[in-house]
Amino acid sequence: MPLFRPAWCALLLFALTTPSVRADDVCGGDQERRKATAEARANIAKVEKSGKQADLFLAYQDAAHDDCLAKELIDKARAGMTKVGIELAAKAEAKGRLYTSEPVALKAGETRRANEPASAFAWLEAAGAFTDANRVMLKAVQAKAEDLRLFETAWTVDDRRPGSYDATTAAIRPYVSPPAYRRELERVAAMNADRLMKAEELDAKGISGSAADVGLAAMKSLDKLRTASAWMQYVPGGDKPAKARAEQRGDAIMKRPDPLFTQGLAQRYFEFSGSPKAKELSAQIQKKGEESQRALEKSGESVKSSITQAGDAEQKKFDKKKSDLEKELGF
């Protein structure tokens, strides 16, 4: 037994001094954590010396999102990322680059590089400075108040933000912007809807005009009602006013003296409004179409019969003349 004691002691010492690695430790144990922390710290220091703010932001961002690093470095990286992100955003805002869909980092395979001309919103959003990001987004929306696509991006901005952890329920609560942010967007939506509804009134005057004018007037009117409806989705009460007016326009067209040629326009209004009149009118148009088709077919058959009868009569005349001539010539 004494012969094996030194070897046993060496194994025990190795077991006590070697860092333990849990099977569920994705970081690979304490030794790997220390190594990763040292590499990240060295990378940050190198980029800091370069003076390139955009590259420094990415270095901080990488470290801030790496749970395998030392907590002290992660905290430093998060603070640095916020600070540098706000500074980069201020420069972009001063140059008028408020919002673009381009991210702060561009990827080529596995390599990331800083996108220095990224917008102020992009830098603030990536830095987690959501209050300032909202301010810049509202500024961008106000500068392009009629841009529905930009507005929709602003409306759904919270959908892409990380929520907060609720220790009581162990649930992730979604991020929700302050009510003032949503109220300002509602104001912009209401303003656009009102503008379009007023412009539609001018277009709709052509509905009572000549047959040459009504088609163009109706198309312009309906286009504005549809766009107004899209804006009204973001205001209390929804798009009921746009739908109600569309039904009124359809009714006005049906009162024209030429409904046979314009009822198709009325049907488009009714379909957009969701009125049951759309289905009723569609059935009427189909019925009239079928009646017209039958009348056309009947007329065609009548003409064909007349042509056939005329052809038979001519053929008989020709045959008689031929017979008379043959007799006269002695054939």
Image (cartoon, rainbow, N blue to C red):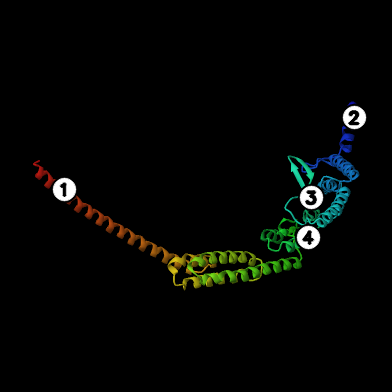
Q: Circle 1 sits in a helix, a strand or a loop, which is it?
A: helix
Residue in the picture at 74% in, 62% down: 143
Q: How far apart are marks 2 and 1 (CA)?
A: 136 Å
Q: Which disc is residue 136 wearing? A: 4
Instruction: Name the amino acid, label 1.
Output: Asp
Disc 1 crowd, CA 10 A, few/some/many (<14, 14-19, 20+): few
Q: Which disc is residue 5 wearing? A: 2
Between circles 1 and 3, the one closer to the viewer is 1
Instruction: Name the amino acid, label 4.
Output: Val
Nearer the observer, 184 or 65? 184
Residue in the picture at 74% in, 41% down: 108
Image height check: is 168 above or below 206?
Answer: above
Which is more N-terminal, label 4 or label 3? 3
Q: Mark 1 sits on what residue?
A: 319
Check contact, mark 4 vs mark 1: CB within 8 A. no
Which is more N-terminal, label 4 or label 2? 2
Between circles 2 and 3, the one closer to the viewer is 3
Instruction: Name the amino acid, label 3.
Output: Pro
On the question of residue 240 being in view, the answer is no
Which is more N-terminal, label 1 or label 4? 4
Disc 3 crowd, CA 10 A, few/some/many (<14, 14-19, 20+): some
Nearer the observer, 283 or 4? 283
Check contact, mark 3 vs mark 4: CB within 8 A. no
Q: How far apart are marks 3 and 4 (CA)?
A: 16 Å
Instruction: Name the amino acid, label 2.
Output: Arg
Q: Mark 3 sits on what residue?
A: 117
* Residue 188 placement (x, y as % from top left): 70, 67
On the question of residue 112 being in view, the answer is yes
Q: Circle 2 sits in a helix, a strand or a loop, which is it?
A: helix
Q: Distance between the residues labelled 4 and 1?
A: 95 Å
